[in-house]
Amino acid sequence: MMNLAINVQGLERVYGSGSQRVLALQGVNLQVPAGQFVAVKGRSGSGKTTLLNCLGGLDRGNAGTIHIFAHNITHLNDAQLTEWRSKEIGFIFQSFGLLPTLSAFENVELLLRIAGIPHRQRQERARHCLELVGLGKWIEHRPYEMSGGQQQRVAIARAIANQPQLILADEATGELDTETGNEILSLFRKLVDEQLLTILLATHSNQVDEFVHQTLFLQDGRIVGS
Ligand code: ADP
Ligand code: MG
């Protein structure tokens, strides 16, 4: 049987109630094989961020089941989700989310510290991951001394540092110019091909087409094709 990174059945997410009720996800079924770079495309408001948040355990559905590799995360409580996420999932956001007073190295190392990785291992992994994303010479620089593309590379190094199997990237190239965006997309593809990662990238842009293995389309909270 194919090794699935993501297996979602009937996922629903409702926000609010009464006249404020929004069906952000209305019965999403989704299977993503391990080792692929997959885009989830859809307009603003189609449910991409809600889907990624549910997949990474930052949010919960109101119905349906979510398996990420061998883990059924559907009924985990908050503490279990946090513990699971810190080992299994790397998140990348549009706005990078780096701490401005910390160097690139410290930004990557901090997450490993929170995950309880011993000092020596933290240092080695942070350095290794920053080299992997092409920032070997920039590890002592702070975010404001780097370009947007470099900052996103730090965020990618941070996301892969704890060796997660799945990376969830929400509009990860949304704040970058086309050329820099292409560099980041090609880095994602390289990581999938060489580090055996699975990456799910939410986007509303067509820029991803030449880099991904597969594209899924989300419309009004439903997968409408691939
Ligand atoms: P996308 O990332 O594709 O732009 P979202 O997942 O952010 O889509 O939003 C999907 C739908 O859910 C939209 O209609 C949005 O307005 C609504 N929504 C998202 N977050 C919330 C929230 N916290 N409270 C209420 N409605 C929300
Ligand atoms: Mg979004």
Image: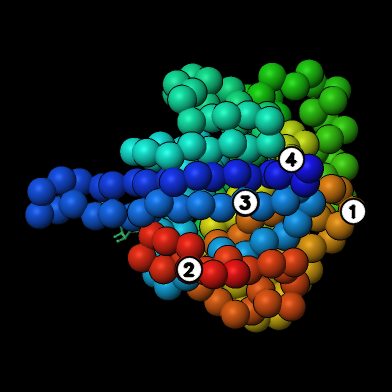
Q: How far across and down, in percent of the image, does residue 215 sit? A: 63, 68
Distance in Å between CA atoms under marks 3 and 2: 13 Å
Q: Earlier in the sequence, mark 3 or mark 2?
A: 3
Which callout, 4 or 2, points at the residue further toward the start of the chain? 4
Whether label 1 lies within 8 Å of ligand 2 gets the answer no
**x and y percentages locating residue 60 in the rendered image:** 40, 37
Q: Name the residue at 49% across, 23% down.
A: 76
User: In the shown orientation, is residue 191 left or right of residue 65?
Assistant: right
Q: Which residue is mark 4?
A: 165
Q: Is residue 101 left or right of residue 124?
A: left
Judging by the rendered image, the residue that carries numbered circle 2 is 224
- Disc nearer the start of the sequence (3/1): 3
Image quadrant in which you'd find residue 126? top right
Outermost residue on the front side: it is 1
Q: Position of residue 160 (x, y in %)?
A: 74, 43
Q: Is mark 4 within 8 Å of ligand 2?
A: no
Q: Which amino acid is tagged 2? A: Val
Q: Which residue is mark 3?
A: 31
- Picture residue at 75% right of the left edge, 56% below the top: 36
Kindly state the secondary structure of the residue where label 4 is placed: loop
Disc 1 is placed on an element classified as: helix
Q: Nearer the viewer, residue 153 or 222?
A: 222
